[in-house]
Image: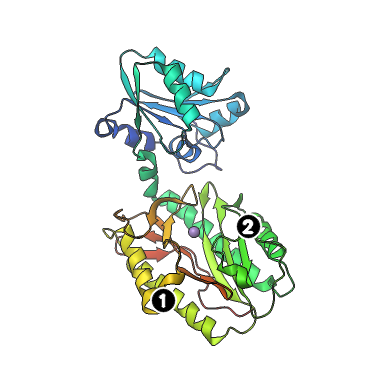
């Protein structure tokens, strides 16, 4: 009788392994070695930081170490748990070596280190042929099922509420680090297990650094402040950016803000099943180009979001990935002007049957605090 996974784990991965196995013939593999922890979590429910998941048509085996004995049993259903005594790679290789015949085994050329790959080759012997995994698990993860969507929707609402909280306490004289600390405290107090990435609070000229880390710099009147934050809820991430003005914004800042918001709207409007990821980027970029701001938009328009804060697909220039219903994406154009500062507006959206629906709900109006 199968045990129910603990309430704190992600939705049941019951048929995800079967879906991967059904691709073995087209991938031309006999087995699949999963090494990237988010992929292991997706397929098995196991959320520990050390492990390998070996998927074979007849069985799935999680190799981990004795720190995770109880957790692995609690979090997984229908998966053999092998607690390795003398090294994970040796245990994986020994299992592969014990099978008869020649075998093609998929592994990640992105996540496995050169040292791990060499060790596997040496330990598993010549009967195992290692082949690239074609990101098969990442591709499965890109399409969310309703139970995953409802968690991401909750994580998005949580960060929207954290932003509303933050707008009530931000004032000149606080440091960027003060604001970041308040945001991360609120994230946890609202039930998240933590921030999905290090919270970005960047003020004044520093807001032009698209990925600034918060510093002890004090917020001043008439500065822009970029807040980029996200929360992890039951293993799924949200990611939202808002830009606020301390005091009344200049007419130049208002104009820039409107251009970025229009670009974001255009990007969202380009999302629908069948559209290409690059089309979304093109639509957002066109608006900024028409406003004479193309050179200030220095990154891609967005990315997939789920167990990881950046996952497939990438909404970059010319990306040919076909968007599908159930994908969760960020749409986050921005402009970054040296000396003046930066403006970015980022929402999480889900691809629906006919377009895109916002998951993050905080206002996109320019707030003057
Ligand atoms: Mn993002």
Q: Is residue 59 left or right of residue 87?
A: left
Q: Along the line of sight, which residue is nearer the eye, 318 or 54?
A: 318
Query: Residue 39 sits in which quadrant?
Result: top left
137 in relation to 164, above or below: above
Q: Is residue 89 visible?
A: yes
Quadrant for the C terminus, please: bottom right
Decide: few, some or many residues near mark 2? Use Cα within 10 Å; few <14, some 14-19, many ≥20: many
Which is nearer the N-term, disc 2 or disc 1? 2
Decide: few, some or many residues near mark 1? Use Cα within 10 Å; few <14, some 14-19, many ≥20: some
Q: Nearer the viewer, mark 2 or mark 1?
A: 1
Spatial CA distance of label 2 from label 1 is 29 Å
Q: Residue 243, percent across and down? A: 56, 72
Q: Along the line of sight, which residue is nearer the eye, 300 or 6?
A: 300
Q: Residue 354, percent across and down? A: 29, 64
Q: Secondary structure at mark 2?
A: helix
Q: Residue at x 42, y 61 (%)?
A: 300
Query: Residue 366 sits in which quadrant?
Result: bottom right
127 in relation to 75, above or below: above
Quadrant for the N terminus, please: top left
Checking the image for residue 262, the label placed there is 1
Q: Residue at x 61, y 80 (%)?
A: 368
Checking the image for residue 358, the label placed there is none
Q: Residue 156, percent across and down? A: 51, 60
Q: Residue at x 50, y 28 (%)?
A: 115
In this figure, which residue is indicated by the disc labeled 2? Answer: 187
59 in relation to 274, above or below: above
- Which residue extends farthest bottom? 251
89 in relation to 185, above or below: above
């Amino acid at each position: 009788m199968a045990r129910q996974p603990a309430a704190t784990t992600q939705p049941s991965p019951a048929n995800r392994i079967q879906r991967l196995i059904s691709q073995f013939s087209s991938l031309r593999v006999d087995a699949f070695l999963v090494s990237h922890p988010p992929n292991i979590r997706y397929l098995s429910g196991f959320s520990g930081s050390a492990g390998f998941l070996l998927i074979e048509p007849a069985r799935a085996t999680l190799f981990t170490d004795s720190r995770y004995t109880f957790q692995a049993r609690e979090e997984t259903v229908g998966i053999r748990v092998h607690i390795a005594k003398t090294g994970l790679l040796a245990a994986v290789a020994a299992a592969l070596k014990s099978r008869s015949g020649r075998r093609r085994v998929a592994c990640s050329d992105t996540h496995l280190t050169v040292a791990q790959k060499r060790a596997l080759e040496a330990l598993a012997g010549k009967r195992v042929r290692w082949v690239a995994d074609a990101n098969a698990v990442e591709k499965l993860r890109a399409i969310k099922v309703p139970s995953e969507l409802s968690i991401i929707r909750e994580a998005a609402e949580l960060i929207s509420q954290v932003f509303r909280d933050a707008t009530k306490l931000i004032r000149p004289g606080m440091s960027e680090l003060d604001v970041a600390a308040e945001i991360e405290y609120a994230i946890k107090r609202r039930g998240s297990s933590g921030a999905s990435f290090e919270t970005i609070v960047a003020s004044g000229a520093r807001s032009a650094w698209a990925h600034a880390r918060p510093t002890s710099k004090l917020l001043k009147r008439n500065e822009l402040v970029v807040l980029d934050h996200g929360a992890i809820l039951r293993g799924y991430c949200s990611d939202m950016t808002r830009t606020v003005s301390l005091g009344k914004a200049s007419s130049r800042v208002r104009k820039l803000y409107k251009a970025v918001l229009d670009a974001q709207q255009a990007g969202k409007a380009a999302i629908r099943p069948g559209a290409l990821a690059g089309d979304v980027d093109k639509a957002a970029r066109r608006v900024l180009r028409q406003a004479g701001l193309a050179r200030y938009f220095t990154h891609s328009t967005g990315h997939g979001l789920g167990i990881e804060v950046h996952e497939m697909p990438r909404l970059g220039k010319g990306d040919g990935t076909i968007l599908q219903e159930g994908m969760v994406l960020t749409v986050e154009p921005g402009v970054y002007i040296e000396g003046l500062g930066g403006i970015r507006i980022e929402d999480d959206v889900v691809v629906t049957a006919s377009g895109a629906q916002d998951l993050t709900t905080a206002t996109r109006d320019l707030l003057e605090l």
